[in-house]
């Protein structure tokens, strides 16, 4: 942008002054890691191209339908996260109605290209229309921002989500409040199915995720570039200004209300495209998809990566969705769990001696606990290790390790023994909270039973309960990130009041 | 009213302005005018309604009665950004910079009202968007250059929060001038500054008029600043204008002394 | 002629039944809204997790009633049993609220305003999913055993307390409405008469100045969460008594409605929150009763949007000035 170098300043020697010191101290606080610095230095277009390249290479390199499917899902989430980032990351508006736009677009696409109303428009007609309609809906649903802001606006947007869910779930008998005969708008709980796939230049996409990987990747490529330019232009600056201080922005000639509408609507446009892809790719839209959990998922992605940073939200979406997928299979989930725990300890624990002591402590604690439980309550040990379809941990070194270190009750999945895990879950949460509250050696001492307890809960309950563990994981991401690093992994640490 | 020639219309003209919050009257029937190219200072004890006056002019509050005319056109009821685009810009007593934006971005953001490219043009980087971007970039550099070395060079791309207090005040003024106002409302520009910086800011305000061509309405507690640059001084107390004239006239006005020091206080200067 | 009369009688009966049940539901919302309004007043935080604290309260009550009052042979008489359920739920929820505040909100005291809200959403989701994990996603029901007169168990609660003309009211509804009023009066006395209450008002007016005047702001906030969450716990047990049904997701919608009640009543205003709760309870009941049960959420939330838009300064609140 600023191609001219700062000229007309003869002496470029670093002057000792207040500003430099403040700047350095800010750097010290923010402390960008090596990875971050590397990402900063690489030109964004190159990063984007690399990302798109990798995403598109997946279906060319493998024929594993599951992997390609995860690739397509991930790209769809990336698109959603980029759209949400406009309102949340740039303009600072907590757009809790975002999923409505996605759902609206998916339903609209479905109804314009399925047997539901027997309309089968061509893709080049439906997609632009759906996107335009979703942008319009974005403007309409953001209208409350003219009178409300902050939390109140967020809540009203959430009302729209509730209304949308109510409408889609019961919309099979819509009757204009008794003023007309009842007719089927949304297909109700079973949704709209048998949706036409995309047809582009006579080529029918799908069935299957392969083609939609390319469609979505192309969409991401275009949207990311367009948004990159917007971010550097007057609108992007004005959004950031209104996030920083709406009142000052307004007084500096920035029409804050209009820009709030615009931010929500532009984000909605992206959700509009993503919704169309959703309809065509899954060939069905269902009311359960577009609910609060999806909203939390997309928020967790945006916030983990770093709201406000395009690269960050892309990264966040990939990480979160891939982790959520891995959590589906106990065998894989176990590796993620232990790896995350070890990485977390490596990142947070210094000096090494302490880390070593901790690991030794946890190991000894586990063995002792195993022996004591085995002596007191025989049924409490020797239970099965939970595994997935591709088990390789029931035998061999790791399995032996887990067997002798962990307490695994037999008949774990009877109602009675469930309770053991449940109590342990609550106790572990209390221990974790206590660890954050304690200081010094007490914390390290408490960490030993906490870590072992977490592993116990993991092995006995969570590993088999992936429908619950996945959302729990999202909730934990939000809470922990807000407490430790609100800017996310790649966002710039923001300074509020100095 | 005395010095206000009927042939020449004042740039900013407040007529019978009143505002009350609940039962409390904050501004009471205030008449005030600022001529083109004038520097007018508003003084008064805390709570006299000085900042409220700025809030009224910039549209943060709406007056209960009275009118605010800029060049003969009423500003009452316009949203703040429209008022800014008509030619009124302000700084804030408490400093309200866009802290996490860079120094230059702060100044560029203030030119929003003077650019026209649509979001589609920006997305596609069409000629108008690119031309405007070049223009406001150059304009921002020019405005920052107004402050000598203080806001130059490497500081352009630093976040605003990294600036020192005095430089933040300067940046606020730069941001206000970048919105191309005709009249600048400066709310205590010298607050919290040391004597050297105060002296510098006094000179700067003079320069803003001479070189920048701005008309300036100023709130200030530091009497050295007020004395040094004001063409005219207006004293407020409890939302009422209690004195108006040259600095010496106002400073020696018994009502002003009373307002600052209380009724029975001895006048020792 | 007589058919018209009978029809009218029918409709009036229906109306009164709806009115009473609307008041009862409204009382529940009012109790939850009190927690929202107090926390918002003191911390300027939308405690999104509050609705889920209420859900936990309902479960605590459920477990107490189940453990001690099996329907056929309750261990103890019905009145102490219910009081015990209330006490357990209020204590449990109060502690939960304090823990949530201490660990999820306190570290964010000086963070940007959006951060605690996101954290609160995270806590809400976490509590909800924890409930799914611990207590399964399937609905449970308070075993009120029998609605028949004469049988033992909690069924007695559902006897008609009294009837005036067409107007009849069940014991349980009476209990809910009266205890809401009692709790509201108690809370008002607490806020206006006690030292802690005064500190609370001071903090909600200006936290920074209060801390400079020697008020322990953190303690005040803790007390606020304790009381607000305890009230939500009471509301949870009442919900169980009125509707019997409870599930891990019940806190979400109730929380949204109760927060709106707090806003409609003027945030930070105790009486206003109760009025707002009753208003929204009645609106909901009449919407379901007269307009549409299938699209009740659609209609109700559109009304709530309108409430938020036009009453965002509250029934009794004064317009808030922007500080410039």
Image: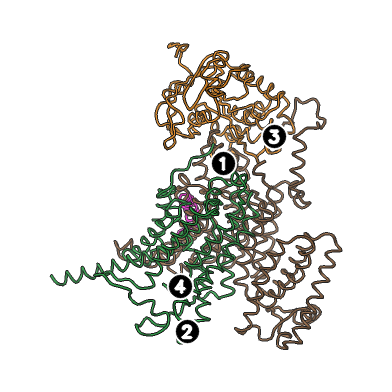
Chain colours: A brown, B orange, C green
Q: Distance between the residues labelled 2 and 1?
A: 61 Å
Say which residue label 3 marks. A2
- Whether labels 4 and 3 belong to a single chain: the reply is no
N-term mark: 1 or 3: 3
Q: Distance between the residues labelled 1 and 3?
A: 23 Å
Q: What element carries label 3?
A: loop
Q: Which of marks 4 and 1 is in front?
A: 4
Residue A124 at least partly seen: no
- Whether labels 2 and 1 belong to a single chain: the reply is no
Estimate the x, y position of residue C44 in percent, counting from the top left. Answer: 54, 50
Q: Is mark 2 on a helix, strand or loop?
A: loop
State which region is magenta: A120-138
N-term mark: 4 or 2: 2
x 61%, y 85%: residue: A414
Secondary structure character of the magenta stretch overall: helix
Q: How far apart are marks 4 and 2 (CA)?
A: 17 Å
Q: What element carries label 4?
A: helix
User: Label 1 neighbourhood size at 10 Å, few (<14), some (14-19), many (20+)?
Assistant: many
Which chain letter matches label 1? A
Circles 4 and 3 in contact, beta carbons < 8 Å = no
Q: How far apart are marks 2 and 3 (CA)?
A: 79 Å
Say which residue label 4 marks. C240
Extreme residue toward the bottom, this view: A378
Decide which of A448, A342 is in the foreground and name it.
Answer: A448
Estimate the x, y position of residue C324 in percent, counting from the top left. Answer: 54, 36
| Label number found at residue C74 | 2
Decide which of A387, C174 is in the foreground and name it.
Answer: C174
Say which residue label 1 marks. A242
Estimate the x, y position of residue A71 in percent, counting from the top left. Answer: 64, 63
Quadrant including the N terminus of chain C: bottom left
Q: Distance between the residues labelled 4 and 3?
A: 64 Å
């Amino acid at each position: 942008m600023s191609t001219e170098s700062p000229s007309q300043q003869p002496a470029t020697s670093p002057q000792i002054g207040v500003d430099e010191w403040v700047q350095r101290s800010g750097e010290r606080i923010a402390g960008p890691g090596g990875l971050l610095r590397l990402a900063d230095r690489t030109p964004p277009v190159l990063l984007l191209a690399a990302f798109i390249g990798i995403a598109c290479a997946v279906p060319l390199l493998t024929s594993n339908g599951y992997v390609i499917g995860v690739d397509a899902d991930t790209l769809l989430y990336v698109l959603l996260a980029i759209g949400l980032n406009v309102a949340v990351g740039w303009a600072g508006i907590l757009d809790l109605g975002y999923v409505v736009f996605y759902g609206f677009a998916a339903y609209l696409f479905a109804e314009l290209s399925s047997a539901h109303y027997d309309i089968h428009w061509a893709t080049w007609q439906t997609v632009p229309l759906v996107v335009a309609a979703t942008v319009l809906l974005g403007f309409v649903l953001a209208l409350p921002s003219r009178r409300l802001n902050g939390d109140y606006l967020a809540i009203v947007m959430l009302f729209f989500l509730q209304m949308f869910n109510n409408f889609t779930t019961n919309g099979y008998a819509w009757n204009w409040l008794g003023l007309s005969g009842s007719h089927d708008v949304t297909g109700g709980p079973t949704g709209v199915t048998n949706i036409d796939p995309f047809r582009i230049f006579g080529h029918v996409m799908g069935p299957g995720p392969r083609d939609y990987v390319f469609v979505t990747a192309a969409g991401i490529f275009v949207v990311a570039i367009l948004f990159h330019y917007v971010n550097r232009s007057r609108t992007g600056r004005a959004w950031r200004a209104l996030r920083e201080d709406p009142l000052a922005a307004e007084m500096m000639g920035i029409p804050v209300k209009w820009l709030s509408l615009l931010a929500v609507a532009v984000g909605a446009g992206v959700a509009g495209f993503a919704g169309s892809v959703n309809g065509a790719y899954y060939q069905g839209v269902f009311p359960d998809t577009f609910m609060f959990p999806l909203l939390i998922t997309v928020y967790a992605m945006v916030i983990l990566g770093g709201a406000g940073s395009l690269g960050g939200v892309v990264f966040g979406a990939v990480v979160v969705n891939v982790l959520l997928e891995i959590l589906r299979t106990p065998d894989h989930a176990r590796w993620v769990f232990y790896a995350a725990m070890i990485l977390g300890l490596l990142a947070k624990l210094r000096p090494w001696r302490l880390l070593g002591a901790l690991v030794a402590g946890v190991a000894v604690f586990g063995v002792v606990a195993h022996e004591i439980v085995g002596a007191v309550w025989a049924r409490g040990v020797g239970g099965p290790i939970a595994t997935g379809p591709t088990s390789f941990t029931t035998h061999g070194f790791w399995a032996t390790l887990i067997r002798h270190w962990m307490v695994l009750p037999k008949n774990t999945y009877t109602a009675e023994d469930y309770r053991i895990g449940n109590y342990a879950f609550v106790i572990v949460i209390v221990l974790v909270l206590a660890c954050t509250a304690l200081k010094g050696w007490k914390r390290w001492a408490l960490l030993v039973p906490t870590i072992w307890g977490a592993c116990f809960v993991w092995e006995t309950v969570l590993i088999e309960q992936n429908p619950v563990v996945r959302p729990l994981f999202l909730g934990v991401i939000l809470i922990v990130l807000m407490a430790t690093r609100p800017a996310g992994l790649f966002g710039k640490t923001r300074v509020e009041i100095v | 009213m005395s010095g206000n020639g009927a042939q020449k219309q004042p740039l900013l003209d407040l007529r019978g302005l009143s505002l009350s919050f609940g039962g409390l009257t904050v501004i009471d029937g205030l008449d005030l005018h600022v001529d083109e190219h004038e520097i007018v200072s508003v003084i008064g004890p805390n709570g006299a309604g000085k900042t409220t006056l700025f809030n009224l002019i910039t549209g943060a509050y709406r007056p209960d009665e009275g009118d605010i005319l800029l060049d003969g056109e009423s500003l009452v009821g316009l949203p703040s950004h429209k008022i800014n685009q008509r030619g009124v810009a302000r700084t804030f007593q408490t400093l309200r910079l866009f802290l996490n934006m860079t120094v230059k971005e702060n100044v560029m953001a203030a030119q929003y009202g003077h650019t026209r490219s649509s979001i589609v043009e920006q997305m596609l980087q069409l000629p108008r968007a690119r031309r405007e971007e070049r223009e406001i970039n150059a304009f921002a550099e020019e405005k920052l250059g107004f402050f000598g070395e203080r806001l130059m060079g490497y500081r352009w791309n630093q976040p605003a929060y990294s600036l020192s207090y005095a430089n933040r005040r300067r940046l606020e003024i730069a941001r206000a001038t970048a919105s191309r106002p005709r009249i600048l409302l400066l709310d205590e520009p010298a607050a919290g500054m040391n004597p050297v910086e105060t002296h510098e800011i006094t000179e700067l305000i003079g320069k803003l008029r001479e070189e920048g061509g701005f008309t300036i309405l100023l709130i200030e507690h530091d009497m050295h600043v007020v004395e040094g640059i004001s063409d005219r001084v207006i004293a407020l107390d409890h939302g009422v204008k209690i004195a108006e004239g040259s600095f010496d006239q106002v400073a020696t006005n018994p009502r002003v002394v009373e307002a600052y020091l209380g009724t029975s206080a001895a006048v020792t200067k | 002629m007589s058919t018209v009369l009978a029809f009218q009688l029918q409709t009036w009966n229906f109306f009164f039944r709806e009115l009473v049940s609307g008041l009862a539901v409204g009382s529940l919302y009012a109790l939850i809204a009190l927690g929202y309004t107090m926390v918002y007043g003191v911390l300027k935080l939308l405690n999104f997790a509050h609705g889920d604290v209420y859900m936990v309260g309902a479960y605590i009550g459920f477990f107490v009633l189940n453990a001690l009052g099996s329907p056929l042979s309750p261990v103890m008489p019905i009145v102490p049993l219910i009081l015990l359920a209330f006490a357990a739920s209020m204590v449990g929820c109060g502690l939960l609220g304090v823990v949530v505040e201490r660990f999820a909100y306190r570290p964010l005291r000086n963070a940007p305003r959006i951060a605690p809200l996101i954290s609160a959403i995270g806590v809400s989701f976490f509590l909800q999913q924890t409930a799914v994990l611990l207590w399964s996603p399937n609905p449970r029901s308070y075993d009120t055993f029998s609605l028949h007169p004469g049988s033992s168990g909690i069924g007695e609660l559902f006897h008609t307390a009294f009837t005036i003309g067409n107007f009849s009211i069940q014991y349980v509804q009476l209990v809910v409405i009266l205890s809401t009023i009692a709790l509201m009066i108690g809370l008002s006395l607490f806020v206006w008469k006690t030292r802690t209450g005064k500190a609370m008002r001071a903090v909600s007016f200006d936290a920074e100045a209060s801390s400079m005047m020697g008020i322990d702001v953190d303690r005040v906030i803790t007390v606020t969460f304790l009381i607000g969450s305890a009230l939500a716990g009471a509301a949870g047990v009442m919900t169980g008594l009125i509707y019997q049904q409870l599930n891990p997701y019940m806190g979400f919608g109730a929380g949204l409605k109760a927060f709106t009640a707090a806003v409609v009543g003027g945030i930070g205003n105790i009486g206003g929150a109760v009025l707002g709760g009753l208003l929204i309870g009645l609106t909901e009941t009449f919407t379901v009763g007269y307009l549409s049960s299938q699209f009740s959420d659609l209609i109700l939330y559109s009304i709530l949007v309108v409430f938020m838009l036009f009453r965002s300064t509250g029934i009794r609140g004064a317009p808030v000035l922007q500080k410039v």
